[in-house]
Image (tube, rainbow, N blue to C red):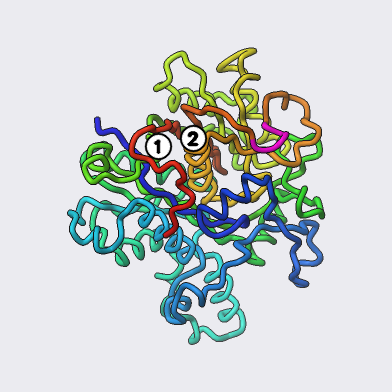
Amino acid sequence: MQRVVVTGIGMLSPLGMGVEENWEQISLSKSGIRRIEDASLAELRCKVVGKVWDYQPQDHFSSREIRRYDRFIQYAMLAGKEALYRAQLQPEVIANLDQYRIGVAVGSGIGGLDNIDKESNKLAAGKAGKISPFFVPGTITNMASGILSMQYGLRGPNLSVVSACATGAHNIIAAAQSIQSGLADIMVAGSAEYASTNLGIAGFAAMRALSENDCPETASRPWDENRDGFVLSDGAGILVLESYEHAKQRKAPILAELVGYGMNADGHHLTQPDPEGKAAMRCMQKALQCLGNQRVDYVNAHATSTPLGDLVEPYVLKQLYGDDAKKVPMSSTKSMHGHMLGAAGAYEACVSILALIKGKLPATINCDHPGHGCDLDFVREGMRDAKIEYALSNSFGFGGTNAALALRRMDSYHTTDYTATSA
């Protein structure tokens, strides 16, 4: 079976635009969460949100493109561009490769919620004739993959997996399987999300899923005894996956190897995880088969800052490793950037890859008083130096869907200071 490696990554989040800026803020253990300023949401108990704060559409796209593409598509295009350039796959390079063996698997948990919100307002105002002709093609989730393929002439497998908060990880798995089955040599994979519209915030607030902590910097607090819900945020994470032999042949910057993955379902509840974590454990075990009896060196946890959800991964890690679970560092970078829903898994896979490259463990901020059942090493003191050979990135979503990615550090062909290579 083909080995699958990562040769490029691209990132957008409330922490910044691009790999370099995101890693810098993570290194400083900074929060990208801010207060909601929109007066129309004043009656909500939720007061904080995470947006890509520095993003200005006109700086990156024409007015025509802005009208045609929902914000989540724009995010996917920007992160995709960065990932391709960092993988040394500029348009002129792609033109000289077999474009029918380069595909795209990019999804979104929500899709074009911004377009839906805006266009439905026209309908409610009795202006059905003013609905944009680009409403449907600019909204549907697979259009992120479609536009990326059109932009770069990528004519291989083209798909978009939608699976709530596991969307990003599932697209990475689908892309890896396309390479392993021989359908492609290269896949652009990941996810993007723009759900922090008024409708999105109000919808999640109605579920009582969002934190009601009114202090932006401390609202997202995975594993803390005072955690009360996640902080909704936006962003994108895009990876370039490639067969090892193909990447080696073109002397690409190999960053990490995807050595294992797992996916299954709780079959338990619409939004709440199985408290016994049976499916989550099997999912993580499947991803970690590549390690044999060796412990994983770092877990980038799904933990979103919800009372029930945060208990799953500590419980499972104890079941897997017993007392040795306390020797496995596990952190949730959502404490800094919030929960990007469908984009979370891909973005956090990028964070895990950077941790492998840099030999640094990202911190969990705001976990001042770990709650009951939360007694593992959550890297609470700030970023920590560590030699990391294997990392596990988990994603669990509404509907009980689970995904886990096992990544291995690569010593050959990767650039030492990867974040310094800009698109």
Q: Which residues are magenta?
A: 379-383
Residue 261 is one of the magenta-drawn residues: no
Decide which of 48, 119 is in the foreground and name it.
Answer: 48
User: Residue 264: x and y, percent?
Assistant: 46, 32
* Position of residue 227 in the picture relative to residue 252 (left or right): right
Find residue 383 and report its image quarter: top right
Q: Against 63, is 267 above or below?
A: above
Q: Which mark is residue 370?
A: none
Give me the residue at 50% from left, 86% from top.
Answer: 130
| Residue nearest the viewer, comparing 80 with 90 | 90
- What residue is disc 1 on? 256
Is 107 on the left-hand or right-hand side of 269?
left
- Label ID, residue 356: 2
Marks 2,1: beta carbons within 8 A: yes
Dot placed on the residue nearer the N-terminal end, 2 or 1: 1
Looking at the rendering, in which quadrant would you find the C terminus?
bottom left
Label 2: how many residues lie within 10 Å, few (<14), some (14-19) or many (20+)? Answer: many
Whole-Å distance between the Cαs marked 2 and 1? 8 Å
